Image (cartoon, rainbow, N blue to C red):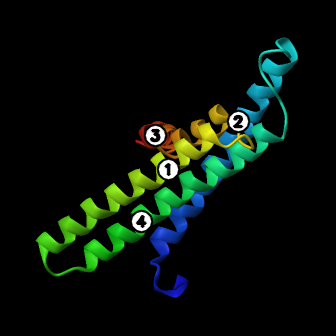
Amino acid sequence: MLENIQPAVKKETGRVMAITGVGVILMWIVFAALHFSMPGKVPLDYTVFLGGIAGGIVAVLNFFFMGLAVQKAAAATDEDAARMRIKASYSQRMLLQMLWVIVAIVAPCFHFVAGIVPLLFPGTGIKIVGIFHNKKQEGKN
């Protein structure tokens, strides 16, 4: 299965994995700082770490599945079929994320904030990297 994945999808998924990993670690640092300043209100236990790991995995999987859908849609010869594939992928990925949000809220082994916040890291990280990349390009010109 992995041999049919285009190198660009692998490369970008790796970048998103790194961005999400950094985001999760920064989130844990914020949890730690808040815990030490308000120990009764903000926990720093296994639920925070488990939520961050699982949320990060869901976020990276979402991006990876999007990359696979785009790859398959780009290879399609029928434009309507490609459009339908992208729409179906979007719906399935949103369902996956919504199911994760429900699990993160309901399951006592996950801290719900630590589980949900990592879903924001890929998009935010890509935008931040893009801003710095554009600034770097402007400096070269």
Q: Nearer the viewer, mark 4 or mark 1?
A: 1
Q: CA distance from mark 2 to mark 1?
A: 15 Å
Residue under label 4, please give it.
Answer: 67
Residue under label 1, please give it.
Answer: 99
Q: Nearer the viewer, mark 3 or mark 4?
A: 4
Where is 18 relative to 30, above or below?
below
Mark 2 or mark 4, which has the lower sequence index?
4
Mark 2 or mark 1, which has the lower sequence index?
1
Q: CA distance from mark 2 to mark 4?
A: 29 Å
Secondary element at image label 2: loop
Q: CA distance from mark 1 to mark 3?
A: 26 Å
Residue under label 2, please give it.
Answer: 111
Mark 1 or mark 3, which has the lower sequence index?
1
Q: Nearer the viewer, residue 85 or 125?
A: 85
How many residues crowd around disc 1 within 10 Å: few (fewer than 14), some, or many (20 or more)? few
Mark 3 or mark 2, which has the lower sequence index?
2
